[in-house]
Image: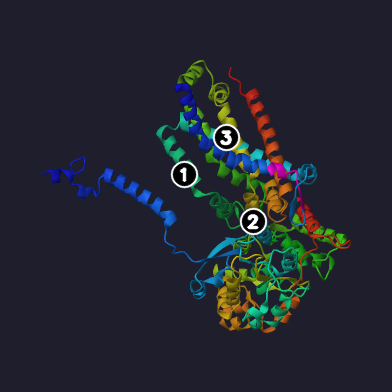
Amino acid sequence: MTARRGTLATGLLLLPAALAFLGLFVAPLGYFFVQSFWKASSFRIVPDFQFDNYARVFTDYGGALGFTLGVAFMAATVATTIAFLFAYAVRFSLGRAGNVLLVIALITLFGGYLVKIYAWRTILGLDGILNSALLSTGLIAEPLPFLLFNTGAVIVTLTHYLLPLAMLPLFGALRDIDDSEIAAARDMGAGVTRVIIDVVLPQIRPALLAAFAMCFLLAAGDYVTPSLVGSPGGAMFGNFIQSQFGLRMNTPLGAAMAFSLIGASLLVLGATGLALRLGFRAR
Amino acid sequence: MRRKSEDRDHCGRPAAASGVSRRALLQGAAAAGIAAGLALPFRPAQAATSRISFVGWEGYDAAFAVGDILAKNDAALDTTYINASEDMITKLRSGGMGTVDFTTFNHMYNPVMGEVGLVTPLDTGRLTNFPKLMPKFQSMAKEADGKVYGIPFTFSSCALLYNPKLVTAPPTSWKDFLKPEYKGKVALFADVLTNILVWAPVATGVKDATRLTREQLDATIELLITLKKGHIRAMPASLGDGAELLIRGEAAMIMGWEPMVLWCRDKGVEVSIAKPVEGTWAFVDTYNIAAEAPNLELDYKLLDHIIGAEAQAKFGNDNFLGVANADAVALLSPEARALYDYDNLEAYFEHAHIYPRMFPTESDGTHVTYDQVLDGYDRFLKA
């Protein structure tokens, strides 16, 4: 009787979360998944069951999808690598100063996404801080135009935005590492690099994947950054999805594009997880 | 004595010194919360009787703030700002009919919007200010089917703007964007309609850019791709971004918009408007009453106010856009008036073409449909 009451209480406690999950995540996604098999005609959506939308994703937008996955992979890799190095230094080398630096890094999250994008436009532009500094030091005679409005600027901006998000899971995982294991490895003659590869990274593998996944998924779905700092030819998949939902009012194709992006992203994350497992084994 | 101890907090300080005790504060907050929660559904009706729903471009609702038209009619305005004209269609199609009062479609959209029943045919006889609109706008309000689906209230054009300090000579053609000396120093606006309507006449010489053959569309897209690959510095996502490119010296020439001249001047950068031989595209935006509008009678009254001289002048001065009411021109600030050739609007529109309607939605066997234009534009973006 008590056990049953306990189960009932647990169920009741879980009910709000379950309803929120079903109502806010499962139901809208389910609706759009069903719609991804429908078709649009003259600004109207017609129920149907066909795979043309998915076929079009790969025939018409396959290049944009591949480009987007490449940009997201680069941004996530760079952000995760820098975040790991930073978190490692905070955890093992910088002492109290490390905590201060960590707080400062996390405070940048409060700055807002668009502010960061415009900050990089100010830094990388023709009359930006970087060009002005290079000109004043005499290293260049003319401002460098290639710093802004290209894929490199998109990756730099996304990396800056994603960095604090990647630091959080990595620092959390590094805090759980037992100092004595590292001391033992060092006592046995392992250098810093060997300790990181053989002792640290295998233990924080799930956090590495979590940090990478968070960065990758946010970057893959982004369409604002390429619009503001990317090249005119650098439209990412998100820009085309936005266009289908807005300008073209073709939500079935937009939904098919969104689910294709989710599927492709899961494949990339699966491959990354496998690579991390093979690359970072505890010895 | 007892009273004295009650007046102290747990640290022995007089309660007055710390304001209120924590318990009292919590009790008060809880009581206030419960009272507010209980009172909310029974709140006395101080809100306006009529809620007017506006779905359109930001700034286009400026006229409602002129005078006390809303208060006088016991009405309040609910605004939904859009990012593209299609947002209005989405809003109306997805449950907006019956709740939306006003939309602000570009006049090119009106025939289709009327045909599919998203906007109400208007009786201009009920608008006392309609005869005060300039003759061009009065005549263009009536569509081919004889009905009026929107009242023209503002206009502007896609202007070729340039920074005189960054060009060797004032541009005379859109083709100047292709000159080697401006490689990487020009910018297109990131909008499908603007790009096609401006560049189709440049690429093909077509007179009506909304009626393109397959070959003409392909030639237009090829020209846009050539521009993109070899000449464009950026495609700003907004007009503000475009102005910033000029202000920062990132671009010497840009497909822009007349108000950008004043935005740039405000930042200390003088830019000029060129008159390319191919002309450009003018847009005329209208006020529509949505189909099944919930406040039809009041909407007519408000619409009449919106196209009145005072409201038009407020709109023009706030947004630096053209006004349709002839009496409003005299009320404009000198800089807002100077942007448009009000003394010779015929000449203005001879250069900035007004197209009567959108691309065909269904194939007529000769011309490309809007969907094909959008496919072509996607090809340009992907190239």
Q: Which residue is mark 2?
A: B95
Identity, as a three-letter code, of the amino acid under mark 1: Ile
Q: Residues within 10 Å of mark 1 (few under 14, many from 20)?
A: few
Residues at discs 1 and 3 both on one chain: yes
| Percent coordinates x, y for residue B187 in the rendering | 69, 61
Residue at 65% x, 41% y: name it. Answer: A29
State the residue position of label 1: A107
Q: CA distance from mark 1 to mark 3?
A: 18 Å
Give me the disc on residue A211. 3
Q: Is residue A36 magenta?
A: yes
Q: Is residue B181 visible?
A: no
Q: Chain of mark 2?
A: B
Residue A42 colored in magenta in the image: no
In the image shown, does B134 or B305 lie closer to the viewer?
B305
User: Are marks 1 and 2 in one subunit?
Assistant: no
Give the residue at x 44% y 35%.
Answer: A98
- Range of residues picked out in magenta: A32-40
Crowding at dot 2, Cα within 10 Å, few <14 / some 14-19 / many 20+, comes out as: few
